[in-house]
Image (spheres, grey):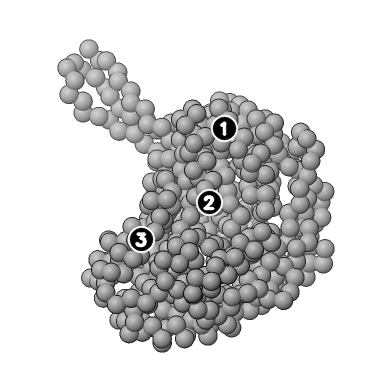
Amino acid sequence: MDLPHVSATVREFIDKGPKKLLIGRWVESQSGEVFDSIDPSTGERLASIYQGDASDIDAAVQAARRALEGPWSRISPSERARLLWRLSDLIEENAHELSQLESLDTGKPLTETSMVDIPMTVDHFRYFAGWTTKLTGETLPVSFPGDYLTYTRREPLGVIGAIVPWNFPLMITSWKLAPALACGNTVVLKPSELTPLTAIRLGELCREAGIPDGVLNIVPGLGPKAGAALTHHPGVDKITFTGSTRVGREIVRASAEDFKRVTLELGGKSPNIVFPDADLNAVAGGIMMSIFFNQGEVCSAGSRLYLHKRIYDDVLSKVVERANAIRQGAGVDPGTQMGPLISEEHQNRVLKYIETGIEDGAKVLAGGRFPSKTGYFVQPTILEARDDMTVAQEEVFGPVLSVLPFEDLSDVIRRANRTDYGLAAGIWSRDVKKAVRVAHGLKAGTVWVNGYNLLDATSPWGGFKQSGIGREMGKVALDHYTEVKSVWVNLT
């Protein structure tokens, strides 16, 4: 392929033969079948990858179990910390390569992968490296008759099945892998078949860091084959999944077979509420970040913009002007501000939502179609909509903003909560009392005041309602990767 702006190191990685599976060591899939990773900016093949299926998943689970019961269980907490810290150093040392590789595979702008995806990946491994020596239990003052030493201890859950989406492949992998390894678990990772390349490169770095064979296993493959096999495998103790609500339901059903632990980070239809006392100079930029960052392929995208009627026209005109000025192109092109969507199938899905919105009476203020070029592009689109429209209720997962006027504070809280989702929300106001009142009234796992898409390794991430189960990031994530055991020692 002709890959301008791409380093020789990345070219070499891509040009190597089909990428192998990591099952204790690098191996070909048992079927020998391969699939292609596609460059979404051109629709051309980027690289070939061996395609894992149920037999490969089984081999990976067995490798993870052997490592769990073998060398990994004998490594001290401080040594686990050292390995995770060494991995974070290697990611940082290879940040430019990983940024380009992620940009090529996902289509997202290089400015985003280099400033968000890779630095946050590094931060997550370092943050959880610090927790390995702090997973303490408690001594309990029990009142049962007699004399007892009673205490709790945290133990690893076991083999973790991690299923990662295509929109933030490496960063979301770190959300799952870092706490899982910090707590002493082993992992079978199933990256999205649309974006497997940085996961494979991460596997190489894990081996370079000295992480023992079988602790991390990577099986790229199709969801209905590899993903389903992982969720149903009796040797897997927990599934951590980020993706669609539909697939999340299937995983919950599968977990009932043997009562696997499950954490799910699913869809969203997040409200972004702007009051007339907001700093209007900051609002327009915040709105752009909320919906057009990562081409709108963000579960927390602020896709419902509630503008107070007093500032409706002023703010909307600024946002439309900025949306029309966005430069689209290949993600690795330094001049690109918004890249293509991930696939032709997803491009068609997003365009269908726009078409449905127009049929329902939405007014197109910007975009509404895809540029006449190769690749899976959709223009930044702004629609004047109503709450009852499909485009304002269902997750589009693309650069499509539904704008909705409001006047009453209580009414906008009610309208903002009138959705099946509850992942995130934004509030823009200089009135702290009002902002806090609204934040407490919104049914969302994360609420940003005078900002949007703010994330940190220390801050829990997850949703209310159909946006998921459990939390990732922060101290609370450790609860999802450990079992608590009570020990009673009779001293009488």
Residue at 33%, 57% (x, y): give it: 443
For mark 1, give the secondary structure.
helix
Residue at 37%, 77% (x, y): give it: 405
In the image, residue 349 sits, relative to residue 408, either above or below, namely above
Within the image, what quadrant is residue 168 found in? Answer: bottom right
Q: Are marks 2 and 3 in contact (CB under 8 Å)?
A: no
Where residue 393 is drawn, which disc sits there?
A: none
Q: Residue under circle 2?
A: 244
Where residue 418 is drawn, which disc sits there?
A: 3
Q: Earlier in the sequence, mark 1 or mark 3?
A: 1
For mark 3, give the secondary structure.
loop
In three-dimensional space, the C-alpha distance between marks 1 and 3, rounded to whole angstroms, equals 34 Å
Where residue 232 is drawn, which disc sits there?
A: 1
Horizontal and vertical percent for residue 464?
37, 52
Horizontal and vertical percent for residue 455?
45, 61
| Extreme residue toward the top, this view | 492
Give the foreground label among 2 and 3.
3
